[in-house]
Image: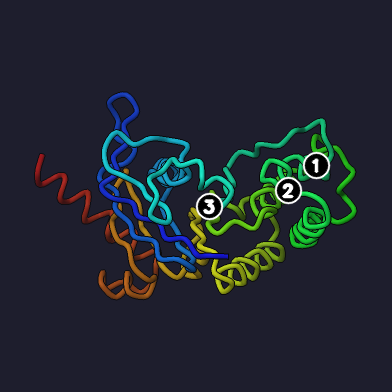
Amino acid sequence: MSSMNVSVRDVTVRFEKRAALSGATLEIPPGSIVGLLGPSGAGKTTLIRCIAGLLRPQEGSVTVAGLPVPDRSLAARVGYMAQEDALYPDLTGLQNLRFFTSLYGVRGPAAREKMSAVFRLTRLEGEENKRVKNYSGGMRKRLSLAVALVHGPALLILDEPTVGIDPVLRAEFWDEFRKLRDAGTTLLLTTHVMDEADRCDRLALIFDGRVLAYDTPAEVCRAVGAKNTEEAFLTLRARTHDREAARA
């Protein structure tokens, strides 16, 4: 599986008069885990929707593997897990997974092998034949991750993938994320959990639609003079407020 780099250049997205993103720029190297850290409404989901090709920015550009987004040829190489699941509640977990697997053109023994693997990973073995409407919230989250992984994407985009799951499973997910990275997958995820941010290879701190900093977690802290990621974020946010107040 070939790795995929992502280039985001001066991306601005406006909803009516409000800017959800203002000149966001990131270079995401292939085979890495990149985290987007920020509070709700900071612009994280808007940014990953642009990268996934689900939203067109009014300004700037996004390329994945050198191709401008959206591009049909990228669909089979990208996995996307949204905050809200896109599952069919009246179908079983297996039927859901089989449907999405077929959309990616994976069939026969390869499909069965991949489905078995992601059911094991997400600890849904034994729940495959239960209707999704009878799944708990955590189970639906796990099935959504299985759907995003089943075709073996080179770029995996995850919007708060560990919300609503227990600490043991969260640790297992992160073990799998690191294995995927080591195998060449590029992972981009959003989070507001500080310890998850520290596990990323590179971290973008986002607030009010702006990328305040982007580097390794350790370098972000060093550049700001902060003891940890939380302090770095709060310091950068305060500096942003001070600059905007001075310009007003």
Q: Nearer the viewer, mark 2 or mark 1?
A: 2
Q: Nearer the viewer, mark 1 or mark 3?
A: 3
Q: Position of residue 220 (x, y in %)?
A: 32, 69
* Residue under pointer 1: 135
The reply to whether the C-beta atoms of the residues labelled 2 and 1 are less than 8 Å apart is yes
Up/down of 89 relative to 202, above or below: above
Q: Position of residue 171 (x, y in %)?
A: 65, 68
Q: Earlier in the sequence, mark 1 or mark 3?
A: 1
Q: Quadrant of residue 124?
A: bottom right
For label 2, the SS is helix
Mark 2 and mark 1: span between their CA atoms?
A: 9 Å
Amino acid, disc 3 = Ile
Up/down of 248 relative to 195, above or below: above
Neighbours of disc 3 within 10 Å: few (<14), some (14-19), many (20+): many
Nearer to us in this view, 171 or 232: 171
Residue 157 is tagged as 3
Residue positioned 32% across, 24% down in the render = 16
Mark 1 and mark 3: span between their CA atoms?
A: 23 Å
* Residue under pointer 2: 143
The reply to whether the C-beta atoms of the residues labelled 1 and 3 are less than 8 Å apart is no
Nearer to us in this view, 236 or 161: 161
